[in-house]
Image: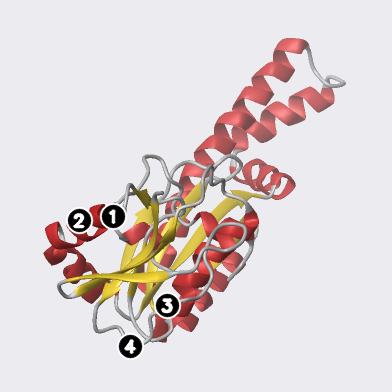
Amino acid sequence: MSTYVYGIAARSHPALPEGMGGVGDPPRPVRILSEGDLSALVSDGPEDLRPKRRDLLAHQNVLTEAGVAGCVLPMRFGSAAPDEDAVTAVLAERAEHYQERLRALDGRVEYNVKGNHVEDAVLHHVMAENAQIRALAEANRQSEGGSYDDKLRLGEAVAAAVKAKESEDAAALRSALEPAADAVSVGPESTGWLANVSFLVPRASAEDFLAAVERVRAALPHLEVRVNGPLPPYSFVEPGPAEPAGAAAGAAADTGSG
Protein backbone atom coordinates (compact mmCIF):
# COMPACT_ATOMS: atom_id res chain seq x y z
CA MET A 1 0.00 0.00 0.00
CA SER A 2 1.31 3.46 -0.87
CA THR A 3 2.06 6.15 1.70
CA TYR A 4 0.13 9.41 1.24
CA VAL A 5 2.09 12.54 2.21
CA TYR A 6 0.35 15.67 3.53
CA GLY A 7 3.28 17.81 4.61
CA ILE A 8 6.68 18.13 6.25
CA ALA A 9 7.52 19.81 9.54
CA ALA A 10 10.35 20.08 12.00
CA ARG A 11 10.59 17.10 14.33
CA SER A 12 10.31 19.60 17.20
CA HIS A 13 6.91 20.84 15.93
CA PRO A 14 4.79 21.05 19.10
CA ALA A 15 1.41 19.84 17.88
CA LEU A 16 1.45 17.50 14.90
CA PRO A 17 -2.06 15.97 14.59
CA GLU A 18 -1.21 12.30 15.02
CA GLY A 19 -4.30 10.11 14.86
CA MET A 20 -6.62 12.57 13.09
CA GLY A 21 -8.45 11.47 9.96
CA GLY A 22 -7.10 12.18 6.50
CA VAL A 23 -8.09 11.27 2.95
CA GLY A 24 -10.10 8.20 2.02
CA ASP A 25 -13.47 6.73 2.86
CA PRO A 26 -13.33 5.91 5.70
CA PRO A 27 -10.65 8.50 6.50
CA ARG A 28 -7.17 7.02 6.92
CA PRO A 29 -5.57 7.86 10.29
CA VAL A 30 -2.76 10.38 10.02
CA ARG A 31 0.56 9.32 11.52
CA ILE A 32 4.03 10.81 11.87
CA LEU A 33 7.23 9.59 10.23
CA SER A 34 10.45 11.10 11.56
CA GLU A 35 13.95 11.18 10.12
CA GLY A 36 16.68 13.30 11.68
CA ASP A 37 15.30 16.74 12.50
CA LEU A 38 12.26 16.40 10.19
CA SER A 39 8.85 14.74 10.32
CA ALA A 40 6.32 13.92 7.62
CA LEU A 41 2.55 13.78 8.10
CA VAL A 42 1.33 10.68 6.28
CA SER A 43 -1.43 8.09 6.08
CA ASP A 44 -2.09 4.99 4.05
CA GLY A 45 -2.81 5.95 0.47
CA PRO A 46 -6.30 5.10 -0.82
CA GLU A 47 -6.48 3.29 -4.15
CA ASP A 48 -7.71 5.32 -7.11
CA LEU A 49 -7.74 8.59 -5.17
CA ARG A 50 -9.52 11.38 -7.06
CA PRO A 51 -9.73 15.11 -6.26
CA LYS A 52 -13.20 14.94 -4.73
CA ARG A 53 -14.29 17.75 -2.46
CA ARG A 54 -14.28 15.53 0.63
CA ASP A 55 -10.69 14.45 0.11
CA LEU A 56 -9.46 17.90 -0.93
CA LEU A 57 -10.89 19.29 2.30
CA ALA A 58 -9.44 16.43 4.34
CA HIS A 59 -5.98 17.09 2.89
CA GLN A 60 -6.23 20.79 3.64
CA ASN A 61 -7.67 20.19 7.11
CA VAL A 62 -4.66 18.11 8.14
CA LEU A 63 -2.35 20.92 7.02
CA THR A 64 -4.46 23.60 8.67
CA GLU A 65 -4.58 21.79 12.01
CA ALA A 66 -0.86 21.05 11.91
CA GLY A 67 -0.05 24.62 10.88
CA VAL A 68 -1.73 26.22 13.89
CA ALA A 69 1.27 25.62 16.15
CA GLY A 70 4.10 25.98 13.64
CA CYS A 71 5.27 25.89 10.05
CA VAL A 72 4.36 22.91 7.87
CA LEU A 73 5.51 22.52 4.27
CA PRO A 74 2.36 21.46 2.41
CA MET A 75 2.53 18.78 -0.22
CA ARG A 76 0.12 19.04 -3.11
CA PHE A 77 -3.03 16.95 -3.12
CA GLY A 78 -2.33 13.45 -4.41
CA SER A 79 1.29 13.20 -3.27
CA ALA A 80 2.11 9.57 -2.53
CA ALA A 81 5.24 7.48 -2.11
CA PRO A 82 5.61 3.71 -2.62
CA ASP A 83 6.15 3.14 1.11
CA GLU A 84 7.33 4.73 4.36
CA ASP A 85 10.99 4.01 3.63
CA ALA A 86 10.77 6.09 0.45
CA VAL A 87 9.44 9.04 2.44
CA THR A 88 12.12 8.92 5.15
CA ALA A 89 14.82 8.45 2.51
CA VAL A 90 13.82 11.71 0.83
CA LEU A 91 13.64 13.49 4.20
CA ALA A 92 17.24 12.44 4.82
CA GLU A 93 18.40 13.26 1.30
CA ARG A 94 16.84 16.72 1.17
CA ALA A 95 17.05 17.65 4.84
CA GLU A 96 18.97 20.87 4.24
CA HIS A 97 16.50 22.05 1.62
CA TYR A 98 13.43 21.33 3.75
CA GLN A 99 14.94 23.00 6.79
CA GLU A 100 15.66 26.10 4.72
CA ARG A 101 12.08 26.13 3.42
CA LEU A 102 10.68 25.76 6.92
CA ARG A 103 12.65 28.80 8.03
CA ALA A 104 11.65 30.81 4.94
CA LEU A 105 7.93 30.02 5.20
CA ASP A 106 7.53 30.23 8.96
CA GLY A 107 4.70 32.61 9.86
CA ARG A 108 3.60 33.02 6.24
CA VAL A 109 0.49 32.00 4.31
CA GLU A 110 -0.53 31.95 0.68
CA TYR A 111 -3.25 34.00 -1.00
CA ASN A 112 -4.22 32.98 -4.51
CA VAL A 113 -5.61 35.84 -6.57
CA LYS A 114 -7.41 35.44 -9.88
CA GLY A 115 -8.58 38.30 -12.06
CA ASN A 116 -10.94 38.54 -15.02
CA HIS A 117 -12.76 41.21 -16.93
CA VAL A 118 -16.40 42.06 -16.37
CA GLU A 119 -17.45 41.88 -20.03
CA ASP A 120 -19.78 44.88 -20.30
CA ALA A 121 -17.54 47.05 -18.15
CA VAL A 122 -14.35 46.30 -20.11
CA LEU A 123 -16.09 46.91 -23.44
CA HIS A 124 -17.21 50.30 -22.16
CA HIS A 125 -13.66 50.94 -20.97
CA VAL A 126 -12.16 50.00 -24.34
CA MET A 127 -14.61 52.20 -26.20
CA ALA A 128 -13.85 55.15 -23.94
CA GLU A 129 -10.08 54.78 -24.37
CA ASN A 130 -9.85 54.02 -28.10
CA ALA A 131 -10.77 56.75 -30.58
CA GLN A 132 -10.35 54.45 -33.58
CA ILE A 133 -12.89 51.97 -32.21
CA ARG A 134 -15.32 54.79 -31.43
CA ALA A 135 -14.96 56.07 -34.99
CA LEU A 136 -15.58 52.63 -36.49
CA ALA A 137 -18.63 52.10 -34.28
CA GLU A 138 -20.04 55.50 -35.18
CA ALA A 139 -19.48 54.91 -38.89
CA ASN A 140 -21.34 51.62 -38.68
CA ARG A 141 -24.16 53.26 -36.75
CA GLN A 142 -24.58 55.98 -39.34
CA SER A 143 -24.68 53.42 -42.16
CA GLU A 144 -27.38 51.40 -40.42
CA GLY A 145 -25.02 48.82 -38.99
CA GLY A 146 -22.38 48.80 -41.70
CA SER A 147 -21.38 46.11 -44.19
CA TYR A 148 -20.12 42.67 -43.27
CA ASP A 149 -16.54 43.86 -43.72
CA ASP A 150 -17.21 46.93 -41.57
CA LYS A 151 -18.64 44.78 -38.78
CA LEU A 152 -15.71 42.37 -39.05
CA ARG A 153 -13.21 45.24 -38.88
CA LEU A 154 -14.91 46.63 -35.76
CA GLY A 155 -15.08 43.21 -34.10
CA GLU A 156 -11.39 42.54 -34.74
CA ALA A 157 -10.43 45.95 -33.38
CA VAL A 158 -12.46 45.42 -30.22
CA ALA A 159 -11.04 41.91 -29.69
CA ALA A 160 -7.47 43.18 -30.08
CA ALA A 161 -8.08 46.03 -27.66
CA VAL A 162 -9.63 43.72 -25.06
CA LYS A 163 -6.68 41.32 -25.41
CA ALA A 164 -4.23 44.15 -24.84
CA LYS A 165 -6.28 45.27 -21.85
CA GLU A 166 -6.06 41.77 -20.37
CA SER A 167 -2.26 41.90 -20.39
CA GLU A 168 -2.26 45.44 -19.03
CA ASP A 169 -4.64 44.62 -16.18
CA ALA A 170 -2.86 41.37 -15.27
CA ALA A 171 0.37 43.35 -14.87
CA ALA A 172 -1.42 46.08 -12.92
CA LEU A 173 -2.98 43.52 -10.54
CA ARG A 174 0.36 41.90 -9.79
CA SER A 175 2.27 45.17 -9.38
CA ALA A 176 -0.36 46.55 -7.01
CA LEU A 177 -0.27 43.51 -4.70
CA GLU A 178 3.40 42.53 -4.91
CA PRO A 179 4.61 45.18 -2.40
CA ALA A 180 2.33 43.64 0.26
CA ALA A 181 3.85 40.15 -0.18
CA ASP A 182 7.19 38.51 0.51
CA ALA A 183 7.15 36.45 -2.69
CA VAL A 184 5.05 35.89 -5.81
CA SER A 185 4.35 32.73 -7.83
CA VAL A 186 2.58 32.98 -11.19
CA GLY A 187 0.28 30.00 -11.65
CA PRO A 188 -0.69 28.21 -14.85
CA GLU A 189 -3.18 29.81 -17.18
CA SER A 190 -6.69 29.19 -15.91
CA THR A 191 -9.69 29.12 -18.22
CA GLY A 192 -11.73 32.27 -17.82
CA TRP A 193 -9.11 34.21 -15.85
CA LEU A 194 -6.60 36.73 -17.18
CA ALA A 195 -4.42 36.44 -14.06
CA ASN A 196 -3.67 33.57 -11.67
CA VAL A 197 -1.08 34.63 -9.11
CA SER A 198 -0.19 33.40 -5.63
CA PHE A 199 1.30 35.70 -2.99
CA LEU A 200 3.30 34.68 0.06
CA VAL A 201 2.12 36.94 2.87
CA PRO A 202 3.23 37.24 6.51
CA ARG A 203 0.30 36.06 8.60
CA ALA A 204 0.66 39.11 10.82
CA SER A 205 0.15 41.51 7.90
CA ALA A 206 -2.61 39.64 6.06
CA GLU A 207 -5.02 42.53 6.66
CA ASP A 208 -2.65 44.88 4.80
CA PHE A 209 -2.62 42.52 1.83
CA LEU A 210 -6.42 42.26 1.77
CA ALA A 211 -6.66 46.05 1.99
CA ALA A 212 -4.43 46.24 -1.10
CA VAL A 213 -6.84 43.88 -2.89
CA GLU A 214 -9.72 46.21 -2.08
CA ARG A 215 -7.76 49.16 -3.47
CA VAL A 216 -7.29 47.25 -6.73
CA ARG A 217 -11.01 46.53 -6.92
CA ALA A 218 -11.77 50.21 -6.43
CA ALA A 219 -9.16 51.35 -8.98
CA LEU A 220 -10.12 48.76 -11.63
CA PRO A 221 -13.91 48.34 -11.37
CA HIS A 222 -13.99 46.56 -14.75
CA LEU A 223 -11.92 43.76 -13.19
CA GLU A 224 -13.37 40.87 -11.20
CA VAL A 225 -10.88 39.86 -8.49
CA ARG A 226 -11.25 36.60 -6.57
CA VAL A 227 -9.12 35.82 -3.52
CA ASN A 228 -8.61 32.41 -1.90
CA GLY A 229 -6.80 32.30 1.43
CA PRO A 230 -5.22 32.16 3.79
CA LEU A 231 -3.87 28.83 2.52
CA PRO A 232 -0.84 26.72 3.31
CA PRO A 233 1.95 28.01 1.02
CA TYR A 234 1.51 25.34 -1.68
CA SER A 235 3.05 27.46 -4.43
CA PHE A 236 6.26 28.16 -2.54
CA VAL A 237 7.35 24.59 -1.76
CA GLU A 238 9.37 22.72 -4.36
CA PRO A 239 8.30 19.12 -5.17
CA GLY A 240 8.52 16.88 -2.14
CA PRO A 241 8.78 13.15 -1.42
CA ALA A 242 6.26 12.11 -4.05
CA GLU A 243 4.84 15.11 -5.89
CA PRO A 244 2.94 13.85 -8.94
CA ALA A 245 3.77 15.63 -12.18
CA GLY A 246 1.17 18.26 -13.02
CA ALA A 247 -0.45 18.30 -9.59
CA ALA A 248 -2.49 21.45 -9.11
CA ALA A 249 -1.03 23.83 -6.57
CA GLY A 250 -3.63 24.88 -4.09
CA ALA A 251 -6.27 22.57 -5.50
CA ALA A 252 -8.02 22.73 -2.16
CA ALA A 253 -8.46 26.46 -2.65
CA ASP A 254 -11.03 25.80 -5.35
CA THR A 255 -13.24 23.91 -2.91
CA GLY A 256 -14.20 27.31 -1.52
CA SER A 257 -12.71 26.66 1.91
CA GLY A 258 -10.62 29.32 3.63
Mark 4: amino acid: Pro
Residue at point 25%, 77% (across, down):
10
Q: Are the residues tagged 3 and 2 within 8 Å (C-beta)?
A: no
Q: Are marks 1 and 2 in contact (CB under 8 Å)?
A: yes
Q: CA distance from mark 4 to mark 3?
A: 11 Å
Characterize the local packing of mark 2: few (<14), some (14-19) or many (20 or more) Cα atoms within 10 angstroms: some
- Quadrant housing the C terminus: bottom right
The structure residue drawn at horizontal position 65% and vertical position 19%, both measured from the top left corner, is 153
Residue 141, placed above or below residue 105: above
Q: Which disc, if any, is residue 90? A: 2
Say if mark 4 contacts mark 2, CB within 8 Å: no
| Direction from residue 30 to residue 192 in the image, left or right | right
**Image depth: mark 4 or mark 3 in front:** 3
Residue 94, given in percent of the width and then of the height, sits at 15, 59
Sort mark 4 into few (<14), some (14-19) or many (20+) by Cα contacts within 10 Å: few
Near mark 3 (Cα within 10 A), the count class, few <14, some 14-19 or many ≥20, is some
Q: Spatial distance from mark 3 to mark 1, Cα to Cα?
A: 20 Å
Q: Nearer the viewer, mark 3 or mark 2?
A: 3
Q: Earlier in the sequence, mark 3 or mark 1?
A: 3
User: Which residue is drawn at the image coordinates 32% and 61% (left, top)?
Assistant: 236
Q: Which residue is mark 4?
A: 14
In this picture, residue 48 sits left or right of residue 238: right
Residue 9 screen position, x and y as percent: 29, 73
Quadrant in which residue 139 is drawn? top right
Amino acid bearing label 3: Glu
Residue highlighted by disc 1:
240
* Secondary structure type for disc 1: loop
Residue contact at pointers 3 and 1, CB within 8 angstroms: no
The x and y percentages for residue 86 are 24, 52
